[in-house]
Image (cartoon, rainbow, N blue to C red):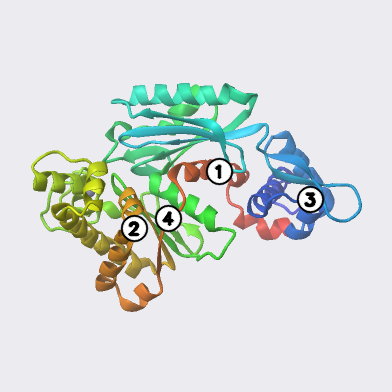
Amino acid sequence: MKNLSPIQPKLLSRINERLVMRMVRDRGPLTRAEMSKSIGITFPTVIKAVSSLLESKLLEEVEVSQSGPGRPAKRLRLASEDTQVVGVTLSDTECIVASAGLDGVIVAGNTKSFPTPANYDSLLAKITSLTKELMRRDDKTTLCLGVSIPGIVDYQEQRAVLSANLPIVNGKYIGRDLQAVLGVECLILRDAHAFSLSERLLHEKGETDSNVAMLDHSEGIGLGMMVNNQFLTGNKGFAGELGHIPIVSDGDVCNCGKKGCLETVASEWALEAKVSTALERPVKIDEILVLAKSGNEPVLREINQMCDYLALGVACVVNIFNPGTFYIYGQCFRELPHLLDLLVENTRQYALEPSFLACNFVHAQGGELDGTIASAINYLTDSLVPDLDDYLTIAKE
Ligand SMILES: [Zn+2]
């Protein structure tokens, strides 16, 4: 490889390391020779990159028996025996902390949960103590902590900007605060983005569309988008606030402070409010779903109404972004399988026909925790150099 100015040798090494990490992440365990062939860089360059990554505990070597004669091949895979990442998911009711190897597999018994505390300091203290417990366990090196947040995240500043449903994190530099006490790199991301990431990883090995939408219908309504295989974050990371598009002119006040947002008529919390009014007593989502399954008419009416409003939002996404696959996530859709068909039928009424017909609606399979862990792993894989694309051509020369 030529050493072309102004790219420094150190940067070239990091580019090569990143190429190796990405290749192993996307294709699974590889020998050094396979890497050299696939990436198109020389064998000595691969050896150098791999040895640096082994030293950093990002890769580990495994012996894989092969069918033909000869010694077992030594392959490199993302480290999982001595190295881990920690994923944290936050919601208005429950928070979860779990650790996984860089293969993304959550270690059995290493998932902890706790009821969401009433203030930010208690939340930090609880995450810190559980993460420290996971960091001590098994004597592994912890490389990164990923935290998903149910609200708008400023990715540049790593700040929770606005969470309508978990206001204790509003304006907090939660990543920086955790990093300061844990001494581990920490990144935060939007919950809907975590869902999209987990869905993408699940389907990565099979047929995937390069334009994918992911509806997160839970306490709020979020949207994750992959556009031309790029994760859509917007300029600062605020993209995907489907729950707060204005739907009802001068409607009810939303948790975000505005009026008539989609969430005020189509979220779980809106459904709870409407059913509680209809039945003249407080009813939570778990009971609503039990009542729906038993055929309770007023409850089914409210669910149908919610689904109709939700279709307005889904149709907007279909018309604007033309996704090939639309993943639908949420407890209502999981427990009431007919609800997806109803949502699709309603969406058909509102969306442009060619865009609707080009979109496949499916139940989501992944989870927020998997996506949060995947984000930490992707961060490690991708953060070796700031922007790969500018250097790719030069690195391969
Ligand atoms: Zn709102």
- On the image, numbered disc 3 is attached to which residue? 31
Could you tell which of marks 3 and 2 lies nearer the N-terminus? 3
Could you tell which of marks 1 and 4 lies nearer the N-terminus? 4
Q: Is residue 140 left or right of residue 199?
A: right
Could you tell which of marks 3 and 4 lies nearer the N-terminus? 3
- On the image, numbered disc 4 is attached to which residue? 364
* C-alpha separation, residue under disc 3 versus residue under disc 2: 44 Å
Residue 341 is drawn in which quadrant? bottom left
Residue farthest along the right direction in this orientation? 70
Residue found 28% across the figure and 64% down from its top: 342
Residue 153 position, x and y percent, is 38, 43
Q: Amino acid at mark 4?
A: Ala
Residue 55 position, x and y percent, is 73, 34
- On the image, numbered disc 1 is attached to which residue? 379
Query: Mark 4 or mark 2: which is in front?
Result: 2
Q: Amino acid at mark 1?
A: Tyr
* C-alpha separation, residue under disc 4 versus residue under disc 2: 12 Å
Query: Mark 1 or mark 2: which is in front?
Result: 2
Could you tell which of marks 1 and 3 lies nearer the N-terminus? 3
